[in-house]
Amino acid sequence: MPNNPVSLKSVVAVAEARASFADHRTGRNCRPTNERIAQLTGLSVRTVQRASTALRLLGVATEVMRGRQRTRAERYASWRVGDRGRGWASVWALHDSRFHRLSPHPEGSLLENQPSVKNSLTTSTRPKAGSSAAPRRTAPSPQALTLANRWICDRHSPPWARRYRTGAPWARLLTTVAEHGWTPRDLNQAITDWIGTGHWIPDAPHKPIGLLGAILAAHGNPAERPSALEEAREAAEFTLTRKRIAAQFAERDAALRARQAARAALSGSGRRAALDIARQAAQRALQRRAEADRLAHEERRTRVDEIRGIPAN
DNA sequence: CGTGGTGGAAGCACGAGAAA
DNA sequence: TTTCTCGTGCTTCCACCACG
């Protein structure tokens, strides 16, 4: 800030004062007036303005909304809720310093992987074992490496899990939990539990591996996987669902078999015999009814002839 | 080098006084 | 009586200067 210097002490004082007004978890909704901050810090309003500018330029604070005079409608609305202020102070959001790394060029960088200008690419002498050379580190276990690589690729993992391009830096830390069969879900559940117990995790932790180590240490026994209960509940629910579906299939098969049996019975010998008997009975009933009708007709005719005096044949 | 003060500017609303 | 102009209040930012 040329021609507008401000001391680190003042910047820190203003940052602390602003932080006391912001939401602790998100850093948002920081809206004190410059005069209020000046009262808290004992600095002048002008110095508070300079320090706020420094915070903005450092990338740790963003002025979300400039302070301004309220419009008449806004003032009426404010009066209804008991706020008689005439203006609105600026709204700030406090956050971490973000380092935005550019994505690699799809064709590859021209500045990387340059051929060495040295004539000889290997050293002529090799330090003997036991000398002052650094000891060789043991390679991380394949389990831990697999867990680390899966974790940094998991879409539920926090952004800082992708701080490093591979999971190798994380592997040594995850050796113990990998031996106990932890999954990326377990790691993320441990992080969620950590936040849920009142801890705060910055967007870009200074030492993410150390932070994860602290989270794992706080979790305690690595044999107790954080998501084991949840997975057991899901497995039980899955089993119940499969049983229910199997019962539905069995019920459907039974209904199918019953329908096929009923259809088969329609063309059976018993049904044919019964139908023949019924048909013969119906014919006999028909013949009896026709005979009865004929007799009744004969009787009526005889009676009519008697009344008319016609002698019977 | 760091702090504090001064003056100017922007944008909006309100109130008082002058003008139509 | 209505409309217009001007000063004031309130918040912010910025440049410049004096002082320890």
Image (cartoon, coloured by chain):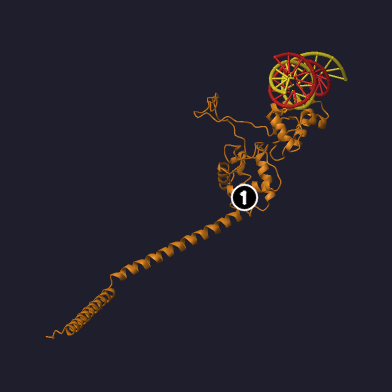
Chain colours: A orange, B red, C yellow
> Quick one: A53 or A121, which is closer to the camera?
A53
Q: Name above or below for residue C2 compared with residue A286.
A: above
Q: Dot 1 falls on which chain?
A: A
- Image label count: 1
Q: Is residue A310 left or right of residue A134?
A: left
Badge 1 is on which residue? A177
Q: Quadrant of the C terminus of chain A?
A: bottom left
Is residue A116 shown above or below A254?
above
Does residue A186 appear in the picture of this structure?
A: yes
Disc 1, SS = helix
Residue A168's image quarter?
Answer: top right
Question: Which residue is pictured at 68% across the width and 48% down the height?
Answer: A196
Q: From where the camera sits, is residue A63 visible?
A: no
Percent x, y of residue A188: 61, 46
**Front-lying residue, A161 or A304:** A304
The crowding category of the residue bearing disc 1, from other C-alpha atoms within 10 Å (few below 14, some 14 to 19, many at least 20), is many
What residue is rendered at 82% in x and 30% in y?
A39
Q: Quadrant of the N terminus of chain A?
A: top right
Residue A205 in the image, given as x and y percentages of width and height: 67, 38
Q: Which of B17 and A277 lies nearest the eye of the viewer?
A: B17
Give, as a three-letter code, the residue at label 1. Answer: Val
Where does the image place residue A219, in percent across and percent down from the top left?
67, 50
Q: Is residue A254 left or right of residue A131?
A: left
- Residue that protrudes farthest toward the left in the picture: A313
Q: Position of residue A254 (x, y in %)?
A: 40, 66
Where B13 falls versus A280 (above or below)?
above
